[in-house]
Protein backbone atom coordinates (compact mmCIF):
# COMPACT_ATOMS: atom_id res chain seq x y z
CA UNK A 1 0.00 0.00 0.00
CA UNK A 2 1.35 3.42 -0.98
CA UNK A 3 1.57 6.36 1.42
CA UNK A 4 1.79 9.81 -0.15
CA UNK A 5 3.30 12.47 2.07
CA UNK A 6 1.66 15.79 1.32
CA UNK A 7 2.41 19.44 2.15
CA UNK A 8 -0.57 21.79 2.31
CA UNK A 9 0.12 25.36 1.20
CA UNK A 10 -2.78 27.50 2.42
CA UNK A 11 -5.03 26.16 5.17
CA UNK A 12 -8.34 27.83 4.37
CA UNK A 13 -11.64 26.27 3.36
CA UNK A 14 -10.37 23.86 0.70
CA UNK A 15 -7.20 22.45 2.30
CA UNK A 16 -8.94 22.21 5.66
CA UNK A 17 -11.68 20.19 3.92
CA UNK A 18 -8.98 17.94 2.44
CA UNK A 19 -7.61 17.43 5.97
CA UNK A 20 -11.17 16.54 7.09
CA UNK A 21 -11.40 13.94 4.33
CA UNK A 22 -7.99 12.55 5.32
CA UNK A 23 -9.12 12.31 8.96
CA UNK A 24 -12.15 10.23 8.02
CA UNK A 25 -11.52 8.58 4.64
CA UNK A 26 -7.97 7.18 4.70
CA UNK A 27 -9.20 3.63 5.46
CA UNK A 28 -11.62 3.78 2.50
CA UNK A 29 -8.90 5.12 0.20
CA UNK A 30 -6.50 2.38 1.33
CA UNK A 31 -9.10 -0.23 0.47
CA UNK A 32 -10.49 1.27 -2.73
CA UNK A 33 -7.69 3.37 -4.17
CA UNK A 34 -4.55 1.66 -2.87
CA UNK A 35 -3.06 4.64 -1.05
CA UNK A 36 -3.37 6.79 2.03
CA UNK A 37 -2.41 10.43 2.55
CA UNK A 38 -0.10 11.65 5.32
CA UNK A 39 0.18 15.40 6.01
CA UNK A 40 3.86 16.20 6.69
CA UNK A 41 3.71 20.01 6.46
CA UNK A 42 1.28 22.91 6.41
CA UNK A 43 1.98 26.56 5.69
CA UNK A 44 -0.59 29.34 5.92
CA UNK A 45 -0.07 33.09 5.80
CA UNK A 46 -2.29 33.62 8.85
CA UNK A 47 -1.53 30.52 10.95
CA UNK A 48 2.21 30.05 10.29
CA UNK A 49 3.86 26.79 9.32
CA UNK A 50 4.66 23.37 10.68
CA UNK A 51 6.73 20.41 9.47
CA UNK A 52 6.52 16.93 10.95
CA UNK A 53 8.36 14.26 8.93
CA UNK A 54 6.37 11.46 10.58
CA UNK A 55 3.08 13.16 9.87
CA UNK A 56 0.64 15.50 11.58
CA UNK A 57 -2.60 14.25 13.01
CA UNK A 58 -5.31 15.49 10.62
CA UNK A 59 -7.93 15.43 13.41
CA UNK A 60 -5.79 17.72 15.58
CA UNK A 61 -5.22 20.11 12.69
CA UNK A 62 -8.92 20.48 11.94
CA UNK A 63 -10.09 20.31 15.55
CA UNK A 64 -7.85 22.97 17.09
CA UNK A 65 -8.99 26.60 17.02
CA UNK A 66 -5.71 28.18 15.97
CA UNK A 67 -5.36 31.94 16.20
CA UNK A 68 -2.92 34.09 14.19
CA UNK A 69 0.52 32.41 14.19
CA UNK A 70 -1.04 29.45 16.05
CA UNK A 71 1.05 26.79 14.29
CA UNK A 72 3.96 28.20 16.33
CA UNK A 73 2.58 26.26 19.33
CA UNK A 74 2.97 22.90 17.56
CA UNK A 75 6.12 20.79 17.72
CA UNK A 76 8.08 21.63 14.52
CA UNK A 77 5.94 24.75 14.13
CA UNK A 78 6.59 28.44 13.53
CA UNK A 79 4.35 31.49 13.68
CA UNK A 80 5.74 32.49 10.25
CA UNK A 81 4.66 31.01 6.92
CA UNK A 82 7.99 30.31 5.26
CA UNK A 83 6.48 28.80 2.14
CA UNK A 84 9.69 28.45 0.16
CA UNK A 85 11.50 26.49 2.89
CA UNK A 86 8.46 24.32 3.55
CA UNK A 87 7.91 23.57 -0.11
CA UNK A 88 11.55 22.86 -0.89
CA UNK A 89 12.53 20.96 2.27
CA UNK A 90 9.46 19.17 3.65
CA UNK A 91 9.66 15.42 2.96
CA UNK A 92 6.56 15.60 0.76
CA UNK A 93 5.77 13.70 -2.44
CA UNK A 94 2.95 16.09 -3.32
CA UNK A 95 2.46 19.81 -2.68
CA UNK A 96 -1.20 20.85 -2.45
CA UNK A 97 -1.47 24.53 -3.44
CA UNK A 98 -4.70 26.16 -2.22
CA UNK A 99 -3.81 29.74 -1.40
CA UNK A 100 -5.87 32.60 -2.85
CA UNK A 101 -6.25 33.03 -6.61
CA UNK A 102 -4.49 36.15 -7.85
CA UNK A 103 -6.12 36.93 -11.22
CA UNK A 104 -3.46 39.50 -12.18
CA UNK A 105 -0.17 37.60 -12.12
CA UNK A 106 -1.01 34.37 -10.28
CA UNK A 107 1.54 35.09 -7.51
CA UNK A 108 2.62 33.91 -5.04
CA UNK A 109 1.02 30.63 -6.14
CA UNK A 110 3.01 30.45 -9.39
CA UNK A 111 6.23 30.57 -7.34
CA UNK A 112 4.88 27.94 -4.93
CA UNK A 113 4.29 25.61 -7.89
CA UNK A 114 7.73 26.37 -9.39
CA UNK A 115 9.54 25.64 -6.11
CA UNK A 116 7.67 22.37 -5.67
CA UNK A 117 8.14 21.08 -9.22
CA UNK A 118 11.80 22.14 -9.32
CA UNK A 119 12.42 20.16 -6.14
CA UNK A 120 10.88 17.01 -7.65
CA UNK A 121 7.44 17.19 -5.97
CA UNK A 122 4.11 16.73 -7.73
CA UNK A 123 1.73 19.70 -7.52
CA UNK A 124 -2.04 19.48 -7.25
CA UNK A 125 -3.89 22.76 -7.10
CA UNK A 126 -7.32 24.36 -7.15
CA UNK A 127 -5.75 27.77 -7.67
CA UNK A 128 -6.74 29.23 -11.02
CA UNK A 129 -3.88 31.74 -11.18
CA UNK A 130 -0.98 29.39 -11.96
CA UNK A 131 -3.11 27.39 -14.41
CA UNK A 132 -4.49 30.33 -16.38
CA UNK A 133 -1.27 32.35 -16.36
CA UNK A 134 1.61 29.88 -16.33
CA UNK A 135 0.34 26.40 -17.30
CA UNK A 136 2.74 25.79 -20.17
CA UNK A 137 5.80 26.81 -18.14
CA UNK A 138 4.68 24.71 -15.15
CA UNK A 139 3.84 21.66 -17.26
CA UNK A 140 7.30 21.83 -18.89
CA UNK A 141 8.93 22.17 -15.48
CA UNK A 142 6.95 19.16 -14.20
CA UNK A 143 8.00 17.08 -17.18
CA UNK A 144 11.66 18.06 -16.81
CA UNK A 145 11.55 16.92 -13.19
CA UNK A 146 9.58 13.70 -13.75
CA UNK A 147 6.57 14.86 -11.74
CA UNK A 148 3.00 16.00 -12.46
CA UNK A 149 1.17 19.32 -12.37
CA UNK A 150 -2.58 18.62 -11.91
CA UNK A 151 -5.42 21.13 -11.55
CA UNK A 152 -8.83 19.52 -12.06
CA UNK A 153 -10.39 21.75 -9.35
CA UNK A 154 -9.46 24.96 -11.15
CA UNK A 155 -12.66 24.70 -13.22
CA UNK A 156 -16.01 23.63 -11.72
CA UNK A 157 -14.44 22.46 -8.43
CA UNK A 158 -14.96 18.70 -7.98
CA UNK A 159 -17.02 18.17 -11.13
CA UNK A 160 -14.79 16.36 -13.62
CA UNK A 161 -14.45 18.67 -16.58
CA UNK A 162 -10.85 19.13 -17.68
CA UNK A 163 -9.75 15.50 -17.51
CA UNK A 164 -13.16 14.31 -18.73
CA UNK A 165 -13.08 16.51 -21.82
CA UNK A 166 -9.42 15.78 -22.55
CA UNK A 167 -9.66 12.04 -22.18
CA UNK A 168 -13.21 11.00 -22.95
CA UNK A 169 -13.95 13.58 -25.67
CA UNK A 170 -10.61 12.94 -27.40
CA UNK A 171 -11.32 12.71 -31.11
CA UNK A 172 -14.78 14.30 -30.84
CA UNK A 173 -13.24 17.60 -32.09
CA UNK A 174 -14.25 20.15 -29.48
CA UNK A 175 -14.44 23.54 -31.16
CA UNK A 176 -16.08 25.62 -28.46
CA UNK A 177 -17.88 25.69 -25.14
CA UNK A 178 -20.26 27.83 -23.13
CA UNK A 179 -21.18 27.51 -19.52
CA UNK A 180 -21.94 28.75 -16.05
CA UNK A 181 -18.49 28.60 -14.51
CA UNK A 182 -18.83 30.50 -11.24
CA UNK A 183 -20.80 29.15 -8.28
CA UNK A 184 -20.95 32.41 -6.34
CA UNK A 185 -22.46 34.55 -9.09
CA UNK A 186 -24.98 31.85 -9.99
CA UNK A 187 -25.94 31.53 -6.32
CA UNK A 188 -26.26 35.33 -6.02
CA UNK A 189 -28.48 35.59 -9.12
CA UNK A 190 -30.74 32.85 -7.73
CA UNK A 191 -30.98 34.54 -4.33
CA UNK A 192 -31.83 37.86 -6.03
CA UNK A 193 -34.60 36.08 -7.96
CA UNK A 194 -36.00 35.11 -4.53
CA UNK A 195 -35.96 38.78 -3.49
CA UNK A 196 -32.68 38.97 -1.53
CA UNK A 197 -30.47 42.01 -2.05
CA UNK A 198 -27.11 41.67 -3.84
CA UNK A 199 -24.84 42.39 -0.84
CA UNK A 200 -26.60 39.92 1.47
CA UNK A 201 -26.49 37.25 -1.22
CA UNK A 202 -22.73 37.77 -1.68
CA UNK A 203 -22.24 37.55 2.10
CA UNK A 204 -24.12 34.25 2.17
CA UNK A 205 -21.90 32.90 -0.64
CA UNK A 206 -18.85 33.88 1.43
CA UNK A 207 -20.21 32.14 4.53
CA UNK A 208 -20.90 28.99 2.53
CA UNK A 209 -17.28 28.89 1.28
CA UNK A 210 -18.13 29.52 -2.40
CA UNK A 211 -16.67 33.00 -2.85
CA UNK A 212 -13.09 34.06 -3.55
CA UNK A 213 -11.09 35.81 -0.81
CA UNK A 214 -12.07 38.99 -2.70
CA UNK A 215 -15.58 38.30 -4.07
CA UNK A 216 -15.16 41.08 -6.64
CA UNK A 217 -13.51 38.37 -8.74
CA UNK A 218 -16.76 36.37 -8.65
CA UNK A 219 -19.24 39.13 -9.37
CA UNK A 220 -17.18 41.08 -11.91
CA UNK A 221 -16.46 37.96 -13.98
CA UNK A 222 -12.65 37.85 -13.42
CA UNK A 223 -12.90 34.33 -11.99
CA UNK A 224 -14.86 33.08 -15.00
CA UNK A 225 -12.38 34.79 -17.31
CA UNK A 226 -9.56 32.68 -15.82
CA UNK A 227 -11.67 29.54 -16.27
CA UNK A 228 -12.41 30.44 -19.91
CA UNK A 229 -8.65 30.85 -20.46
CA UNK A 230 -7.95 27.49 -18.79
CA UNK A 231 -10.56 25.58 -20.84
CA UNK A 232 -9.73 27.34 -24.12
CA UNK A 233 -5.99 26.71 -23.77
CA UNK A 234 -6.44 23.17 -22.54
CA UNK A 235 -9.17 21.94 -24.89
CA UNK A 236 -9.05 24.21 -27.93
CA UNK A 237 -5.26 24.50 -28.10
CA UNK A 238 -5.52 28.30 -27.74
CA UNK A 239 -2.89 30.49 -26.12
CA UNK A 240 -5.24 33.01 -24.52
CA UNK A 241 -4.30 35.34 -21.71
CA UNK A 242 -6.98 36.83 -19.43
CA UNK A 243 -6.82 40.22 -21.19
CA UNK A 244 -7.74 38.53 -24.49
CA UNK A 245 -11.16 37.58 -23.06
CA UNK A 246 -13.81 40.31 -22.92
CA UNK A 247 -15.31 40.42 -19.45
CA UNK A 248 -18.46 41.80 -17.86
CA UNK A 249 -19.85 40.59 -14.53
CA UNK A 250 -23.23 40.65 -12.81
CA UNK A 251 -22.74 43.62 -10.47
CA UNK A 252 -24.65 45.97 -12.80
CA UNK A 253 -27.78 43.81 -12.85
CA UNK A 254 -30.46 45.49 -10.75
CA UNK A 255 -33.37 43.84 -8.91
CA UNK A 256 -35.64 45.22 -11.62
CA UNK A 257 -33.53 43.60 -14.38
CA UNK A 258 -33.99 40.30 -12.54
CA UNK A 259 -37.75 40.85 -12.14
CA UNK A 260 -38.16 41.87 -15.80
CA UNK A 261 -36.38 38.72 -16.93
CA UNK A 262 -38.72 36.58 -14.81
CA UNK A 263 -41.76 38.32 -16.34
CA UNK A 264 -40.35 37.46 -19.78
CA UNK A 265 -39.96 33.76 -18.80
CA UNK A 266 -36.20 34.03 -18.73
CA UNK A 267 -33.27 34.25 -16.30
CA UNK A 268 -29.98 36.09 -16.16
CA UNK A 269 -26.91 33.84 -16.12
CA UNK A 270 -23.22 34.73 -16.20
CA UNK A 271 -21.92 32.89 -19.25
CA UNK A 272 -18.29 32.14 -20.05
CA UNK A 273 -17.59 30.90 -23.56
CA UNK A 274 -14.97 30.41 -26.22
CA UNK A 275 -15.06 29.16 -29.78
CA UNK A 276 -12.78 28.66 -32.73
CA UNK A 277 -13.73 30.81 -35.73
CA UNK A 278 -13.37 30.03 -39.45
CA UNK A 279 -9.88 31.56 -39.38
CA UNK A 280 -8.82 29.16 -36.60
CA UNK A 281 -8.63 31.94 -34.00
CA UNK A 282 -10.14 31.23 -30.58
CA UNK A 283 -12.25 34.05 -29.13
CA UNK A 284 -13.49 34.05 -25.53
CA UNK A 285 -15.95 36.13 -23.56
CA UNK A 286 -17.65 36.49 -20.19
CA UNK A 287 -21.00 38.27 -20.00
CA UNK A 288 -24.43 38.09 -18.35
CA UNK A 289 -27.03 36.68 -20.75
CA UNK A 290 -30.79 36.58 -20.43
CA UNK A 291 -31.67 32.96 -21.26
CA UNK A 292 -35.17 31.67 -21.99
CA UNK A 293 -36.33 29.19 -19.33
CA UNK A 294 -36.17 26.31 -21.81
CA UNK A 295 -32.43 26.90 -22.39
CA UNK A 296 -30.48 24.01 -20.73
CA UNK A 297 -28.31 26.44 -18.74
CA UNK A 298 -31.33 28.39 -17.39
CA UNK A 299 -32.21 25.49 -15.07
CA UNK A 300 -28.76 25.39 -13.42
CA UNK A 301 -29.25 26.89 -9.97
CA UNK A 302 -27.31 27.80 -6.84
CA UNK A 303 -23.57 27.03 -6.74
CA UNK A 304 -24.07 24.37 -9.39
CA UNK A 305 -22.21 24.95 -12.66
CA UNK A 306 -22.59 23.49 -16.14
CA UNK A 307 -20.62 23.60 -19.35
CA UNK A 308 -21.70 22.55 -22.85
CA UNK A 309 -18.91 21.49 -25.18
CA UNK A 310 -19.61 21.92 -28.88
CA UNK A 311 -18.10 19.00 -30.73
CA UNK A 312 -18.00 18.27 -34.47
CA UNK A 313 -18.80 14.57 -34.06
CA UNK A 314 -21.23 14.46 -31.12
CA UNK A 315 -22.88 17.86 -31.21
CA UNK A 316 -23.31 19.42 -27.78
CA UNK A 317 -22.17 17.53 -24.66
CA UNK A 318 -23.10 19.08 -21.30
CA UNK A 319 -21.53 18.37 -17.93
CA UNK A 320 -23.16 19.70 -14.78
CA UNK A 321 -22.24 19.49 -11.09
CA UNK A 322 -20.87 21.44 -8.12
CA UNK A 323 -19.00 24.60 -9.15
CA UNK A 324 -17.85 25.63 -5.68
CA UNK A 325 -17.77 24.41 -2.10
CA UNK A 326 -15.05 23.32 0.31
CA UNK A 327 -15.53 19.55 0.32
CA UNK A 328 -16.48 19.52 -3.38
CA UNK A 329 -13.21 21.27 -4.22
CA UNK A 330 -11.16 19.10 -1.88
CA UNK A 331 -12.52 16.15 -3.84
CA UNK A 332 -10.92 17.62 -6.97
CA UNK A 333 -7.54 17.48 -5.18
CA UNK A 334 -8.18 13.84 -4.37
CA UNK A 335 -9.02 13.15 -8.03
CA UNK A 336 -5.69 14.72 -9.04
CA UNK A 337 -3.86 12.49 -6.58
CA UNK A 338 -5.73 9.47 -7.94
CA UNK A 339 -4.53 10.45 -11.45
CA UNK A 340 -0.93 10.68 -10.20
CA UNK A 341 -1.24 7.33 -8.42
CA UNK A 342 -2.78 5.61 -11.46
CA UNK A 343 -0.01 6.85 -13.73
CA UNK A 344 2.75 5.88 -11.32
CA UNK A 345 1.36 2.39 -10.66
CA UNK A 346 0.93 1.72 -14.39
CA UNK A 347 4.51 2.93 -15.04
CA UNK A 348 5.78 0.53 -12.35
CA UNK A 349 3.72 -2.33 -13.86
CA UNK A 350 5.15 -1.57 -17.33
CA UNK A 351 8.70 -1.61 -16.01
CA UNK A 352 8.10 -4.93 -14.27
CA UNK A 353 6.63 -6.54 -17.45
N1 LIG B 1 -13.81 27.46 -2.30
C1 LIG B 1 -14.15 26.99 -3.48
O1 LIG B 1 -15.29 26.63 -3.73
C2 LIG B 1 -13.14 26.89 -4.57
C3 LIG B 1 -11.89 27.45 -4.43
N2 LIG B 1 -10.98 27.36 -5.45
C4 LIG B 1 -9.66 27.95 -5.28
O2 LIG B 1 -8.97 27.23 -4.27
C5 LIG B 1 -8.10 28.11 -3.55
C6 LIG B 1 -8.41 28.01 -2.04
O3 LIG B 1 -9.75 28.35 -1.84
P1 LIG B 1 -10.34 28.49 -0.36
O4 LIG B 1 -9.71 27.48 0.51
O5 LIG B 1 -11.81 28.53 -0.52
O6 LIG B 1 -9.79 29.91 0.03
P2 LIG B 1 -9.62 30.53 1.51
O7 LIG B 1 -9.57 31.99 1.31
O8 LIG B 1 -10.60 29.91 2.42
O9 LIG B 1 -8.19 29.98 1.93
C7 LIG B 1 -6.99 30.44 1.41
C8 LIG B 1 -5.95 30.28 2.50
O10 LIG B 1 -4.69 30.60 1.95
C9 LIG B 1 -3.97 31.34 2.91
N3 LIG B 1 -2.98 32.14 2.20
C10 LIG B 1 -3.18 33.26 1.46
N4 LIG B 1 -2.00 33.66 0.95
C11 LIG B 1 -1.05 32.78 1.36
C12 LIG B 1 0.34 32.68 1.18
N5 LIG B 1 1.03 33.55 0.47
N6 LIG B 1 0.99 31.66 1.79
C13 LIG B 1 0.32 30.76 2.56
N7 LIG B 1 -1.01 30.82 2.76
C14 LIG B 1 -1.69 31.81 2.17
C15 LIG B 1 -5.00 32.17 3.65
O11 LIG B 1 -4.51 32.53 4.95
C16 LIG B 1 -6.17 31.21 3.70
O12 LIG B 1 -6.16 30.44 4.89
C17 LIG B 1 -8.34 29.51 -4.11
O13 LIG B 1 -7.32 29.77 -5.06
C18 LIG B 1 -9.69 29.39 -4.82
O14 LIG B 1 -9.80 30.25 -5.92
C19 LIG B 1 -11.24 26.67 -6.61
C20 LIG B 1 -12.45 26.07 -6.78
C21 LIG B 1 -13.52 26.18 -5.81
N1 LIG C 1 -15.34 31.44 -6.17
C1 LIG C 1 -15.42 30.38 -7.13
C2 LIG C 1 -14.88 29.13 -6.52
C3 LIG C 1 -14.52 28.14 -7.54
O1 LIG C 1 -13.72 28.38 -8.44
C4 LIG C 1 -16.87 30.17 -7.53
O2 LIG C 1 -17.75 30.71 -6.85
O3 LIG C 1 -17.10 29.48 -8.52
Image (cartoon, grey):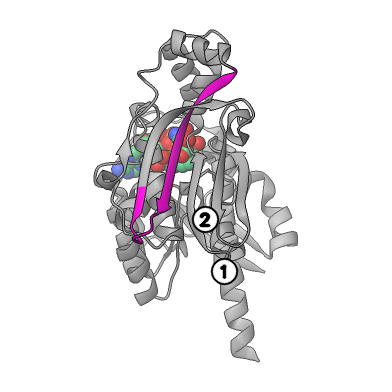
The residue tagged with tag 1: helix, strand or loop? Answer: loop
Q: CA distance from mark 2 to mark 1?
A: 15 Å
Is 300 located above or below residue 7 in the figure?
Answer: above
**Crowd rating for badge 1 (residues with CA inside 10 Å; few <14, some 14–19, many 20+):** few
In magenta stretch: residue 268: yes
- The x and y percentages for residue 150 are 47, 59
- The x and y percentages for residue 309 are 55, 51
- Residue at 62% over, 63% down: 168
Of the numbered discs 2 and 1, the one sitting upstream in the chain is 2
Q: Magenta region, mostly helix, strand or loop?
A: strand
237 on left or right of 6: left
Give the residue furthest to the front.
278
Give the residue number, with chain letter if any, for mark 1: 171
The residue tagged with tag 2: helix, strand or loop? Answer: helix
- The x and y percentages for residue 77 are 38, 45
Q: Quadrant of ligand 1?
A: top left
Is residue 225 among what the camera can see? yes
Is 27 located above or below residue 252 in the figure?
Answer: below
Give the residue number, with chain letter if any, for mark 2: 162
Residue closer to the observer: 82 or 206: 206
In magenta stretch: residue 62: no
Q: Which residues are magenta?
A: 265-283
- Residue at 61% over, 46% down: 319
Is residue 73 among what the camera can see? no
The label shown at residue 153 is none
Residue 98, quarter of picture: top left
- The x and y percentages for residue 189 are 50, 20
Q: Look at discs 2 and 1 and give the one toward the viewer.
A: 1
Quadrant in the picture for the C terminus: bottom right
Amino acid sequence: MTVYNIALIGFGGVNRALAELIATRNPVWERELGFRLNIVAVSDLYLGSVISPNGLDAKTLIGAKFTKGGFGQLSGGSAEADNETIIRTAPADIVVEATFTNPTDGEPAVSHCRWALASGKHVVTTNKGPVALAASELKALAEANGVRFEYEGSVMSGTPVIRMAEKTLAGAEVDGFEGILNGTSNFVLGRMESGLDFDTAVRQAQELGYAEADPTADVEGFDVRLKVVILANELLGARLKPDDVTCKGISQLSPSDIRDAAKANSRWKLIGSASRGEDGRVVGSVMPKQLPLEHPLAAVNGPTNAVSFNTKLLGSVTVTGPGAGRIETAYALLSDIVAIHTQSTSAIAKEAA
